[in-house]
Amino acid sequence: MGEGGYINLVNGTPYRWKRTDQKSYQMDGWDFPDSINAGSVPAVYAEFNQDLLKNRKDTSGSATYTLEGTKCTFSVHVADKPERLWVQLDGLETVNNPRGSKIEVGWRHDESVTFVLSGKQGNFHSSNPPMDWMQQNRNTLGQRPLSQICILGTHDSGMSTVSHCDIPGGVIDPYVLCQSLPVKGQLEQGARYFDLRPQYSGGHLWTGHYTGKVGGRGESIKDVISAVNEFTRDNGELIILQFSHSLQSDTEDWREFKKEEWHALMKELLKLNHLFICEDKKKANNLCQLKLDDFIGGGKAAVVCIIEQWDLKIDDYATKGFYKLEQFNIRNEYSNKDDTEVMVKDQLEKMKGHMSAKDKRLFLLSWTLTQQAPNWDGDVVSFAKIAPRSLKPIKHMARRCNKELFTRLLPEVSDKSFPNVVYIDYLNNRDYVALVVAINDKHELRMVNMIAADWDSWPSSSRSIAHVGQNLDDTTKVLLRFHAYLIRGRQSNLGNLWNDLSELIWDAGFDGKYESRYTLRMQVFPGLLPEEDV
């Protein structure tokens, strides 16, 4: 008997993983599936034999998988004293992880750790992604609009610390703290969307988390600005800062910001470097349709500030990198439950129904649990006494629901079910952004399948010009070429006809004549849109 825990194996690739080897010594649990289908996420249980007479340093285990149809392999390993799991990239490489490298996935007794592998041969992504994951994925994400990209977000992003609270002794801290890392740490762990709730306190700007007058003050806006500027100095990433739930706590009535306070906040935020200014007013009214490359295509960062206050006029700040919520319209509907299963079911159902309803807003998957506050008569002392008995610490709730994210979300992602922001409490490692990259990869693979399915429906013609975007690698081009053969019924040599990654001209060569010409446009998410070229 000994410690036990799970490793989630996230297969975000289009290949089935076939187990080719498995062995262990002094392990009471080490049984990996014979195969793992594309898009599935099995949780494998591992348990050590830690009897007193065992030399725990000798304990070991391994399981090797081959990606069917390729020569790509990786192996999962375990050792004891100290307990740890890692993955060896034996016969493949991923972005940020060369062939033969070791990816440490850790160990959590009675809980789970995760290994993520996604993408296609020649462009794999995995756990331990790069810091600048957006820049490193521009070859596949750059030409997608934001409405077709998934990013990682944090809830109450400024609340990794309580800098002031009217309830003494740290009693309230577990019920207002939502993050374990400050904004700088969240940026380093892959978050790109931040929920910031500005507060005036002591004449200065802070972040806060309050219900009425109960809550706590978090990071200062000054520190948030410093963190973003430090990060964007070396990382050309898109960062979205959304400001809402304002609180003026220097007045007796504790109210929302007035116009002058919002403007004071925006004046302070002008200290942010790389504020994104969209000079085209029409495009500025729908930022979600701008491509990722429109923001960071030059290799430099872009910081977008969203002000969520429906009746506020931002005046001259509208041309300085600040936008109203309707310009970056996002559907954010939290479940308002403290039960994991109820929340998961609710959020997945909302995600599935969002695109089918042709909702034009971005979809934010709010993977958070919400405390159900007790009745309160306004007496702070009485609240301090009853809160620990009736409220659940946010950290404990986050630990329960975050582990479900890895096993529950990816299998539900499809061309009709897709989150634009995965929004969590207590971001503490880069496995979450590895999952986000896998969601984007799966979306791309489904797009390729849509292309393959659509080819059979195209009318026959002697010449077809396909503008296929800048995202296609050799695997995708081979797929397109194969279906061109299938339709035309002949195998013209296309090897020398690929101009570059963005254009293919296929000519069947009917004595130099052709009946009609078709321009086939492909966007990464919607698939092919035919348009007759007249």
Image (cartoon, rainbow, N blue to C red):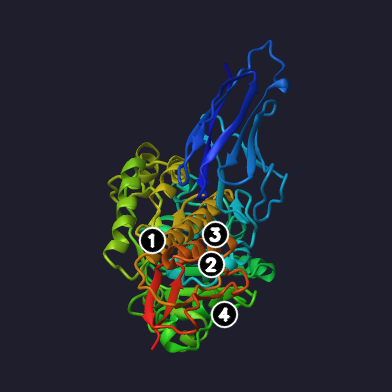
Which quadrant is home to the N terminus? top right
Check disc 4 and give the amino acid type.
Leu
Secondary element type, mark 1: helix
Label 1 belongs to which residue? 453
| Residue 21, quarter of picture | top right
Q: Which mark lies nearer to you, 2 or 1?
A: 1
Residue 33 visible, this angle: yes
Q: Between tags 3 and 4, which lies in front?
A: 3
Q: Is residue 161 visible?
A: no
> Of the residues shown, which amino acid type is indicated by label 3?
Ala
Q: Check disc 4 and report the residue beneath it.
A: 270
- Would you place residue 454 above or below residue 518 in this image? above
Residue 359, compared with residue 116, is above or below; it is: below
- Closest to the observer, 56 or 262: 56
Q: Amino acid at mark 1?
A: Ala
Mark 4 → mark 1, Cα distance in angstroms: 49 Å
Residue 447 image point, x, y percent: 44, 62
Q: CB atoms at circles 3 and 2 under 8 Å apart?
A: no
Marked residue nearer the N-terminal end (3 or 2): 2
Determine contact: label 4, label 1, CB under 8 Å: no
Q: Residue furthest front?
A: 511
**Reading the chain from its start, which is encountered first: label 2 or label 1?**
2
Give me the residue at 60% from left, 47% from top.
70
Q: Disc 4 vs disc 2: which is toward the camera?
A: 2
Residues at marks 3 and 4, CA–CA distance in whole angstroms: 21 Å
Mark earlier in primary sequence (3, 4): 3
Residue holding disc 3: 191
What is the C-alpha distance between the residues marked 4 and 2? Answer: 28 Å
Query: What residue did someone put label 2 on?
Result: 141
User: Which disc is residue 493 wearing?
Assistant: none
Give the distance between the C-alpha atoms of the residues marked 1 and 3, in whole angstroms: 35 Å
